[in-house]
Every structure is written in C-alpha cells, then in structure tokens.
C-alpha cells in the first residue's frame, strides 16, 4: 500500500463508523454534509451500501466534484441553492432518511434537522468550536428523530485496510499535498484548506 493510501486508514475508519451509525439501507435517501477528507471517506463507503440516493453537500465546488467522483448521485452547494427545498422536491416533501453532519458548522445542524424526515436518523460526527443551539422540539415532538453521535473508529481498521487495498474505497487525490518535514510551516499553511487541499502530509 502506498503512503498516500495508508495515511487514510485512520480517517476512513472514522468515516466508516459514522456511516454505520446511520444504519443505511438500499431504500434510504442519504445526505452527507461536508466533503472534506472525512466526508469523502463517508461518501465512498456509503456508496457500498447502495442507498436509493446519495447526496453530498459542501460550500466548495471542487470538493463537490470529488464527491461525485467518489460515488455521490447528487452534489449541492448550500451557498448557491436552497438544499432543504431541493430535498423536499425530490422526496415529495417527505425529507431525507439519513443525514450525516461532517462540517462542524452550526448551520449544517439546523439545515439537517430541517431536511430530515420524521423518524429519520441524524448522525453527528463533527467537533464544534463553540456550543451549538437548535430547536429541540424538532427532535422530539415534531419528528421523533434518532440522533446519534459518532466518535473515532472502533472495529473499522480491518475492513478499511482491505477495501482501500482492493480499490472499493476510493482514495485518489485525497492526500493532495506532501511536504518534507523541513517545510512544515508551508505544510501547516496548506492544511488550513485555503489552497483547496483535502489532506496534507509531512514526509521525513
């Protein structure tokens, strides 16, 4: 296995666990919010579950292009369209069955709670920079949702290693920049994402 692929074992393990928490079936309309390294890992693994429709959301069009390459049926930019209205349109107002939040932005939580159907499954993966608030009546009284947390990657490594190796889990271009350790400052700059990178690595 190449170094570029091996670097994705840990994040893809986390991605697998998040998707598994959503209990996706082939009848589900699934929305994954965020198409960074972890979101792409979720998308390529969720594709293996063969959902009825797999939709990726991100504010960066370049990431959406990669999400499409990795198996998303539809890719939407919430900064350019009303994604809640779009979900309602393709589901006759029903909503998505599973929403996986992988951005760490409060607006993505509110967005997900708005577009998910009654008795749907909401998976929260992200780490937030500050407490996030929302209308909890949506979870209970209005929709009776399953809200699931996801943390790390229990029992995921053997599957991830096997399926990265055999190509079932796509990895092309996710490690987008590699710098020698002497250029660590440049590496950290690129790791902020401001140059459009997914995952950045330092070599020794």
Image: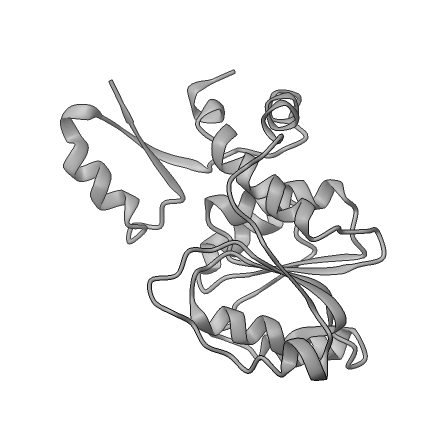
Which of the 4 quarters of the picture holds residue 59? bottom left
Which of the 4 quarters of the picture holds residue 189? top left
The residue sitting at 67% across, 49% down in the picture is 21
The residue sitting at 15% across, 38% down in the picture is 185
Looking at the picture, the colour scheme in use is one colour
Side (left or right) of 137 relative to 145: left
Q: In the figure, 153 relative to 69: above or below? A: above
Q: In the figure, 197 relative to 99: above or below? A: above
Relative image position of residue 56 (x, y in whole percent): 60, 58
Q: Quadrant of the C terminus?
A: top left
- Most foreground residue, 76 or 52: 52
Relative image position of residue 202 (x, y in whole percent): 27, 28
Q: In the figure, 38 relative to 132: above or below? A: above
Relative image position of residue 122 (x, y in whole percent): 64, 63
- Most foreground residue, 161 or 135: 135
The residue sitting at 55% across, 46% down in the picture is 40
Question: How many numbered circles are shown?
Answer: 0
Side (left or right) of 79 relative to 50: left
Q: In the figure, 124 relative to 177: above or below? A: below
């Amino acid at each position: 296995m190449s170094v570029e692929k091996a670097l994705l074992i840990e994040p893809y393990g986390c991605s697998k666990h998040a998707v598994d928490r959503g209990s996706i079936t082939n009848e589900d309309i699934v929305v994954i919010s965020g198409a960074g390294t972890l979101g792409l890992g979720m998308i390529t693994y969720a594709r293996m579950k063969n959902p009825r429709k797999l939709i990726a959301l991100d504010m960066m069009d370049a990431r959406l292009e990669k999400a499409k390459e990795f198996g998303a049926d539809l890719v939407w930019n919430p900064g350019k369209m009303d994604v809640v209205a779009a979900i309602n349109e393709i589901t006759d107002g029903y909503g998505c069955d599973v929403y996986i939040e992988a951005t760490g932005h409060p607006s993505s939580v509110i967005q997900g709670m708005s577009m998910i159907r009654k008795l749907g499954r909401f998976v929260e993966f992200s780490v937030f920079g500050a407490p996030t608030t929302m209308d909890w009546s949506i979870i209970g009284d209005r929709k009776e949702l399953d809200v699931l947390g996801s943390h790390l990657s229990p029992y995921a490594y053997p599957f991830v290693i096997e399926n990265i190796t055999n190509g079932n889990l796509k990895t092309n271009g996710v490690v987008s920049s590699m710098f020698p350790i002497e250029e660590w400052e440049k590496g950290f700059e690129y790791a902020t994402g401001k140059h459009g990178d997914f995952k950045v690595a330092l070599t020794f």
